[in-house]
Image (tube, coloured by chain):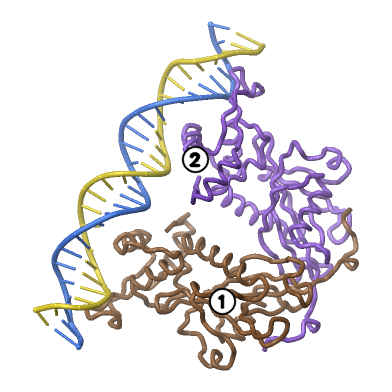
Chain colours: A brown, B purple, C yellow, D blue
Amino acid sequence: MVLNNYRKEDKVLLAIDCIIFGFYQEELKILLVERDFKPAKGEWSLIGGFLKMQENLEEAAARILKNLTGLNKVYMEQVHCYSKIDRDPEERTISVTYFALINIEHHCKELLRQNPIKWFDIKDIPTLIFDHNIMVKEALTLLRNRISCKPIGFELLPEKFTMRQLQKLYEAILDTELDKRNFINKFNSLDLLTKLKEKDMSSSKKGAFLFEFDQNKYHKKVEKGFSFKI
Amino acid sequence: MVLNNYRKEDKVLLAIDCIIFGFYQEELKILLVERDFKPAKGEWSLIGGFLKMQENLEEAAARILKNLTGLNKVYMEQVHCYSKIDRDPEERTISVTYFALINIEHHCKELLRQNPIKWFDIKDIPTLIFDHNIMVKEALTLLRNRISCKPIGFELLPEKFTMRQLQKLYEAILDTELDKRNFINKFNSLDLLTKLKEKDMSSSKKGAFLFEFDQNKYHKKVEKGFSFKI
DNA sequence: TCAAAAGTGTTCAACTTACACCCATGG
DNA sequence: CCATGGGTGTAAGTTGAACACTTTTGA
């Protein structure tokens, strides 16, 4: 029943597809590429590649991301493994998806110019190749779950941010409107942010205080059993 | 940058490993197998197999489960894909895990006898081969999350069950004690169960009323936007 | 001086938690 | 008649949701 010789077994191509999230102009965006090879040449697609023998999936995902954005040490998380037999018409390919959260300001503009890649508003995703629209949908669902209980939203923001930016980020990801007083009260009660003396003057005459996420404080709290739900 | 010929790419073995949960004697159990082939012959392991060309992962997982338990149409859910380079010392193997929820009473006893497989209490899992202990841990975490917001616990129980059985199931999965009045109040407020006229007389002199999960009612509620959290 | 965004507290409703006694029955 | 598990309701505390006005300042 259980086969005892690995060599008899079929081998498959293993692809990695990245759902790269960014946030700007108060909207959640994803980065897509126009395929320049067959099959489905000329159509929009997630950014992907194939697993190599000498790397694991996390390394492959990081490599693919680095190639197209120039970014290192990006927050990534595995989403799901897709295996429908004809999902790729060219050859049997299994694909594992990762979502990535990047600070859109850090993203290398040179590479954006050199490559056929473009940021799309999450509410305005075109028809993608193969099963990529499903992948985006499921990655977004996971992101929504994660951001409700893990402080990962900061990966999408500058290091210093205003409460209003943070609120707009949550609104964009959760696709809902939030009350600003309740939002601030909630976040303050979590005690994860440091209020700076500096103000951001770009969005109003009065200026808005800047905050920083205190990763250290968060980790110490987690060790003591802290968790939250927004 | 993006490779345009699939044939240049490395191919890998793709394994499926199943974390098979069962519930009896008020404890959560998992089914393990003693490996009868190399590497790691004689050690305990999750039940697994390799993906074949003509099937997708869900079909492969169902096939593997059917072979060892005789069961069809089992509730299964993908957990995670593991890819560490030397996770299997014999050959580069990527493994996708699925958890399965089975009614331990339906499990074919003949196959249990024919095969070197055994139910282990979740609190008493031996050291397993490769990264299988991590797989179990992550599958259990996912199961805990799922059971808190989806009515999948019933997959582990007989069709007719008492409130006490349901409570003990939640306690075993969540590894916590629950107050019986609060538990019953909560479940009643969800309005997902049908109380039968029958009683189970096996656990007390008074007897306990049996209940059934009403899948239809649940699906109708979900369509109207119903969700819950236990 | 006014337009535009920032900042700030309270009240009410909903939900969660803690908790103790009587019931029915077989042995 | 009693030991065993079954069944039931309420009060207090906590959390979440709704809601409006004042402040600051550059143009």
Query: What chain letter is assigned to the residue under label 1?
Result: A
Task: Residue B224: give x, y in percent of width and height.
Answer: 49, 49
Identity, as a three-letter code, of the amino acid under mark 2: Leu
| Circle 2 crowding by C-alpha within 10 Å: few under 14, some 14–19, many from 20 | some
**Of the pair A222 and B174, the residue shown nearer to us:** B174
- Nearest to the observer: residue B16 or residue A190: B16
Q: Secondary structure at mark 1?
A: loop
Rendered image: mark on residue B205: none
Residue position for label 2: B190
**Residue B120 drawn above or below residue A39:** above
Q: Is residue B15 above or below residue A95?
A: above
Which quarter of the picture shows residue A19?
A: bottom right
Type of amino acid under label 1: Pro
> For the point 57% across and 80% down, which residue is it?
A32
Q: CA distance from mark 2 to mark 1?
A: 39 Å
Disc assigned to residue A126: 1
User: Going by the image, does B47 lie left or right of D3?
Assistant: right
Left/right of residue A179 with respect to residue B1 in the rendered view: left
> Looking at the picture, do discs 2 and 1 lie on one chain?
no
Give left or right: position of B35 versus A144: right
